[in-house]
Amino acid sequence: MKSIFKNILILLCLIAGQLSGQKLSTLCGEPEGKRAKKIYDELLDAVKSRKGYETIRDLTEVGMEEDTAFAGFPKYLGDAAWRHEDFKTAKASYIKAIELCADVGYEPYYRLGDYFFDIKKYDDAVKYLKLYKEMGDNDSLRNINADKWLNRAKLIQHPVPFNPVRVKAIS
């Protein structure tokens, strides 16, 4: 009985994980035009086979020229740039992807919140971290980090005043 319950619980967790990580294309549409779709398919193959940053960057740049309204190209460029630690490109790409489709996924919001917190732009960090929390990611570690950064950013933005007062001698 316990093993059946355990298997059902594992299956439900896997299904919930699949639903929370929906493909970008179902949330933000598909690229327009045959050439853009072909480039998108090549991009997905490059991402799956873990091609280099330059390859993914080149494909996404060509794709963005071909279809300027599809959020998938800047999102995947942001992902590749983040892994390559090219944070300026990642920031610009994620912001562009969010402008094109607010439902681009939780990672751009989380990573932008992380980036802005690290460079001490706490207003922007709070903005993106709150949006990340609204997306409803199931990853407990990311949620813990987001909560920690939100609390720290609020404390840094609104520090508690420190006004020491000299205590008079007793006796």
Image (tube, rainbow, N blue to C red):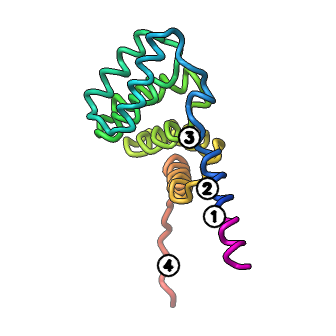
Q: Residue at x 50, y 43 (%)?
A: 110
- For image coordinates 39% across by 31% down, the residue present is 45
* Residue 150 percent across, percent down from the top left: 55, 50
Sequence order check, earlier mark of 3 and 1: 1
Where disc 3 sits, the SS reads helix
Which is more foreground, mark 1 or mark 4?
1
- Residue 42 percent coordinates (x, y): 38, 24
Q: Which residue was labeled with disc 1?
A: 10
Which amino acid type is marked by label 3? Tyr
Which quarter of the image is occupied by the N terminus? bottom right
Q: Which residue is mark 3?
A: 106
Magenta segment: 1-10
> Looking at numbered disc 4 in the image, what kind of residue is underneath it?
Lys
Q: Earlier in the sequence, mark 3 or mark 4?
A: 3
Dot 2 falls on a residue whose secondary structure is helix
Q: Earlier in the sequence, mark 1 or mark 4?
A: 1
On residue 168, the disc is: 4
Please name the residue that numbered disc 2 is placed on: 14
